[in-house]
Amino acid sequence: MRGVITLAGGKKYFVNAYASIRMTRHLGCTLPIEWFYLGDEMKPEWIKIIEEIPNVKCIDLGNVNSNNAKANGGWQNKINAIINCSFDEVLFLDADNFVWRNPEYLFDCQQYKETGAILWKDISDWRKDQNEALEKYFGCMPITKECCESGQLLFNKNKCMDALLRTEEYNKDSKNAYKIVYGDKDTFYFGFISTNSPFHFIEKRPTCGYKCLHQYDHNGDVIFSHLTGGKWALNGRPFITKDSYPYVKECGEFIKELKDDMLNQ
């Protein structure tokens, strides 16, 4: 079964993930969505609001995986959510990542069908002075000049579980792994390389919009705006422009509805 998952808790990321999911539905995606969080990060009234969106389910990651943690940025919970979601094929989206169109077609592209995994490049390259530390920790070297950006990930778990379990191992050791790479993002990259698992690296690198990264699909068209430098707030204020994401107005309306719902509770 195919589905979309996100991971978010706390008011800041709750607001952004809510707007992201509403936009995903607004643009025609009907796939089931699972929203993962940790315990008291989500209030019961927030969960109620989320689960009123059609075919969306909130899941406390602490109830399904004992390896979750908030330490070291909490990034290690991303791989935990991916492994423990109910979907065989999963599109992961960061809480602050917004689709430009219905993303369901990504599951049908040839590159994904052949490899079972799509990763997206970052704007940064590997530095030569990182080589020794990378090889010592991961036991292998990068096979591309570009680093990985994990605001969006697409996996067929039946095809790439070895790589995902290796990624999980790295994130269990986040105290050491995150000293070698920045957070979780390149642990996915090395999870695949170190297990000799195939994956497709989207050819076109991200471009910088205003306070965001534009990520592209296999055809070279923008598909995601990852709001790395700007977030939505409950007062509706966007820290991006329409040039960064074409549906700023629609997002503002969704957040206004959210604010009204929260005030009425």
Image: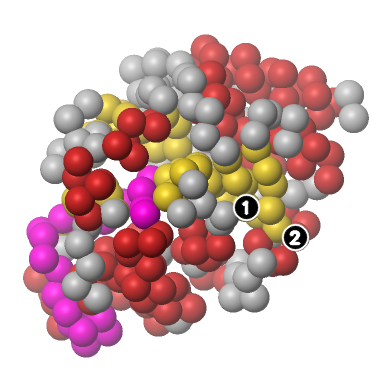
Provide residue 223's location: percent of width, then percent of height.
Answer: 32, 29
Residue at 41 percent across and 73 percent down: it is 165
Badge 2 is on which residue? 39
- How many numbered marks appear? 2
Mark 2 closeness class: few <14, some 14–19, many ≥20 residues within 10 Å: few
**Residue situated in front as seen by the camera: 218 or 213:** 218
Badge 1 is on which residue? 36
Residue mark closest to the camera, 1 vs 2: 1
Quadrant where the C terminus lies?
top right
Picture disc at residue 6: none
Q: Judge from the rendering whether residue 233 lies leftward or rightward of residue 129; answer left or right.
A: right
State yes or no: residue 29 in magenta: no
Q: Residue furthest right?
A: 265
Residue at 79 percent across and 20 percent down: it is 260
What kind of residue is marked 1? Answer: Phe
What kind of residue is marked 2? Answer: Gly
State yes or no: residue 138 in magenta: yes
Q: What is the distance, in whole Å, between disc 1 and disc 2 at their CAs?
A: 10 Å
Residue at 68 percent across and 29 percent down: it is 53
